Amino acid sequence: MIRTWTGSYVRDELGLDIDQDPANSVVPVDALVGVALRRNPRRAHLLVSTVLAKHVPTPPLLVESAGALLGTLVAEQLGQPAEPGLVADASRQLAEALATPRPARDELLALRRLLRGAEVVVPDAVALGYAETATGLGRLVADQVGSYYIHSTRRSSPGDRPVGGFDEAHSHATRHQIVPTDEGWLRPGSTLVLVDDELSTGSTIINTIREIHALAAPRRVVVAALVDLRSETDRARFTELEHELDTVIDVVSLGSGAVRIPDGFAAAAAERVAETVETAPVPAGERGLARILEAPVVGVLAPDRSGASYRDRSDGAVARVVADAVEASSRESTPASTLVLGTEEFMAFPLEVAALLDTRRTGVLFSSTTRSPIAAIDRDDYAIRSVHSFPSHDETIDGPGPRFAYNLTPGGRRFEQIVLVPEPGVTLHDLAAVLDVLATACDEVVVVTVSAPVDEEGARPLRGPSFGSYRADEVGWLLQDLGGIALEAPSADREAAIQSGRAHYAESLPQEYVPSPEYRALYADALERSARRVALAVGVAAEMVLDGRERPPVLVSLARAGTPIGILMKRWIERSRSIGVDHYTMSIVRGVGIDTTALDWLADHHDPADVVFVDGWTGKGAIARELTAALDDYAAAGGPRFSDDLVVLADPGHCVPVFGTRDDFLIPSACLNSTVSGLVSRTVFSERLIGPGEFHGAKFYSELAADDVSGEFLDTVSEHFAAVHAEAAAAAIDLLATDRTPTWEGWATVERLQQEYGLDDVNLVKPGVGETTRVLLRRVPWKILVRPDALDEVAHVLLLAEQRGVEVVHVEGLPYSCVGLIRPLASDSLDPAQGAL
C-alpha cells in the first residue's frame, strides 16, 4: 500500500489552491502538502502532509529524511552549515522521492545516511514540538541539531506540574501545556527552536513565544515548519513581535507559498462534509477476524513530553527490542504490508520502530492515530480516503473525545499487519476499544507495550523471583532490569570495540552460553572438591567482619562475582549469631566508578558505618582501587563517608586487609556465568541507557532456569558451615593478630608480565583463577599462563582453553595458579571463532 493521492479534489471542486514560492522553497510546496476538508467550524480545510505520516501512511525513512532536512536548515540558521551542496542534494533527492509513487527503499536509506552525516550539537538550544501533529517532527529536528527536546501536550497525568501553556485558536482542541521534569529545561538567553508541521497564520507560534518569553527570555527564536503558508500580513506580525520583545525570530521551512481561499469556501466545504459519512465506533465485542498479538517489552521509555537532553535520549536500543518483538510475534510468513501505528502525541518512538522494520523488510509504512476530525472521501485525488474512529483511551486536559485512524483501508485495500505502539504505560485493557476497530481493518494486529518510568519514591531494590533466581530475603539487587534490551555481542566484536576505545566494556554484555555437559561435569567435580574450602573461607571472612561490631553489618556485595559470596556470608552470620543481616548487591565498573544512586539509596536506608562491601576475589586489585577512589569522590561531592575496606573470599593479590584466604584456588562460582549467579548478567553502564537517579543495569536470564545451579552452589557450601565453624573462628582470630596491610604483590606481578609479553595495556593481564576464567568466558583470550604445580586447581581453565583453542604456557614461580592474557589487537587479527564456547 502506498501514497496514491494527489490532493487535487479540493482545488478542482471547491477552488481552494496553494500558490508556490519557488525562491523560498527547497522542495516544491505542492509536493509536500495536499488539502482535505475538516469537520471543524473553526477552519474548513486541513493541510495534509506527504511527509509527516500523521494522516497518510508513509514510508518511515521518507518521514525521517524530511525531518532531518528541516533540522539541517535550522542548524544552518544557527551558524552550523552542512557541507557545501549537501542541502541541495538532499532537497533534490527528497523531491524525487515525493514524485515517485513507490520510492525505492535503497534510495531513501542513502538519503537518510546523507542527512545523518550533517548532524550537529547545539548545546544551548531548546527545541519544542507541537502536539499533536509535530511531536515526531520536533524530535527529528532536535536530533539533527543535537538539542534538548520537549513537546507540548494535551495529555493529563497524575503529578504533572505545567510550567506554561498556550492556545491554538483554529484547532478542534485548543489548549496546550508544557510539563518538563527538569526545572532548568529553559535558561534565559538560550536559543528556542519551535517546530510545527505547517505555518498557516502563525498565531500559535506568536502565543508560544509570548508565553515562553515570560518564563525565560530566549536570545533568539528559530521557527521550523515543513511548509510556510503565511500571508504577508501574518509575516509582518512576526516582525512586530521581534521589536516588541527585543528578540530575533527566524523562520525556516522546506516549502513556502500561500493558501488562496475563494469566497464562499467554508459554506461549500460544509455541504460536502455533510454528504460524507462519519464512521461510528465499533461496539465492544464486535471485533473483526484479525489476530490480536501482544508483544510486551520489558523496558522503560520516558515520553518526550517530559523533556530530555540530546545525551539522555534513547540510542535506539529499546526500539530495536520492539522491532525484534514484532518479528518474533508475527506469523510465520513475513507480512507483505505492515503499518506501524503511533498514537496521537506518541509519534517519535513508533517512527523509530517503523524505520527499523523498514530496513529489514519491504512494505512497511507509518502513521498515527489523531484527535483531528476529517471528512473521508474515497477518491484517488483526495488525501483522506477512509476513517476508523474509536473512543479515547487516555486522559486529556480538555476531556474525552473520539479518536481517528485514517487511510487504513483506502479503496477497500487492507494492510496484512498493523503494529500498534501506544504511549508508555498503556495496557492491553486500556486499548480494548482501539483493538476492536483495528481488528476490522487488517489481518493481524500486533500490540507492543512499553513501560513508563513510574516511581515517585525513586529507585528501589529488585528482588526474586521477579528478578534473579535467589530468594527475595537473600539479596536486594540495587540494579535496574534491562531485560528487554539487546546488549549481547560476540566476544570478538566486543574486544575490538573495547581495545580500540570505541566502547567501554560495561556498555555491552558477552553472549550467555549454556555450558556443555562436559563443562557442567567439571563444575560439579570442582564444587564437590572445594565446597568445604569455600565454606571455611566464608567463615573466616565473616568472623573477621563481625570482630568488634556492636551492630550487625549491612553486607553490600559487588555484582556479580560478589553476590553469591555475600549471600553465603549472610547465611554464616545469621546461623552463627542468630541475628538478621541485610544484604544488597550493587554495581561498580572499572574506569567508571561505583553506582552513586545505589550509594544514595544505602545512605537513605542504613547507617554508612554499618556497610561492608564484599567481592569474590582480588586479581591485581583494580576493583579495590576503584572502590577507594569512588568512595573518596562520593564523600568529596558531599555524600556520607563509606568505608573502603573491601572484604573478599580470596585475596591472592594481597590487595585487601579482610579476606577468607590468600590462596589462589578455584571458587566454583567463577566457573560459570549467570547460571551460578542468580541468572543475572554482569552489570551494565551506558549513559544512553542509565539516566540520572537510576541504578546501573543488568539482565535476568530467566530462560536459562533449567540450567541454573545458583541455589545448589549456595546450599552445597552452606552444608559445611557447622563442620568448619571452630576452624574458621580460630583462623580469624589468628589473622586479626597479624599484619594484613596490603602489599599489592599481585599488581607488581601483572606489571612484570605486561612487559615480558609486550602488552601495551595492563588491563590485558588478568591474574588468578577467577579472572582467567572470565577471560575465557567473556573476552578473546590470547594465552593462559599456568603454574605447573597448580594443575589440579585449574582443570576447568584447561578445558576451556582446549575448547577455544587457546595456548597454555607453563610458567614456574607464578604467585597465582594461572593468569589469562587477553589477545591484543596489535598482535594479529581477532578470530571470531573464539567468541563461542
Image (spheres, helix red, strand yellow):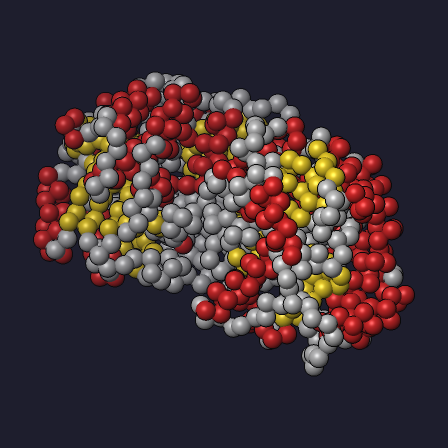
Lateral position of residue 154 relative to residue 338, left or right: left
Lateral position of residue 246 relative to residue 525, left or right: left
Q: Position of residue 743 (x, y in %)?
A: 64, 62
Task: Let me know if residue 120 appears in the view.
Answer: yes
Tell me the quadrant of the picture where the C terminus can be found: top right
Going by the picture, which residue comes out furthest to the right?
723
Q: Nearer the viewer, residue 673 or 26?
A: 673
- Quarter assignment of residue 509: top right
Going by the picture, which residue comes out furthest to the bottom?
550
Q: Position of residue 802 (x, y in %)?
A: 76, 33
Q: Residue at x 61, y 23 (%)?
A: 333
Q: Residue at x 42, y 30 (%)?
A: 60
Q: Position of residue 510 (x, y in %)?
A: 62, 40
Q: Nearer the viewer, residue 370 or 196?
A: 196
Q: Residue at x 62, y 68 (%)?
A: 645
- Quarter assignment of residue 836: top right
Q: Nearer the viewer, residue 692 or 385?
A: 692
Tell me the quadrant of the picture where the N terminus can be found: top left
Q: Nearer the viewer, residue 781 or 716?
A: 781
Q: Residue at x 69, y 71 (%)?
A: 739
Q: Position of residue 7 (x, y in %)?
A: 29, 25
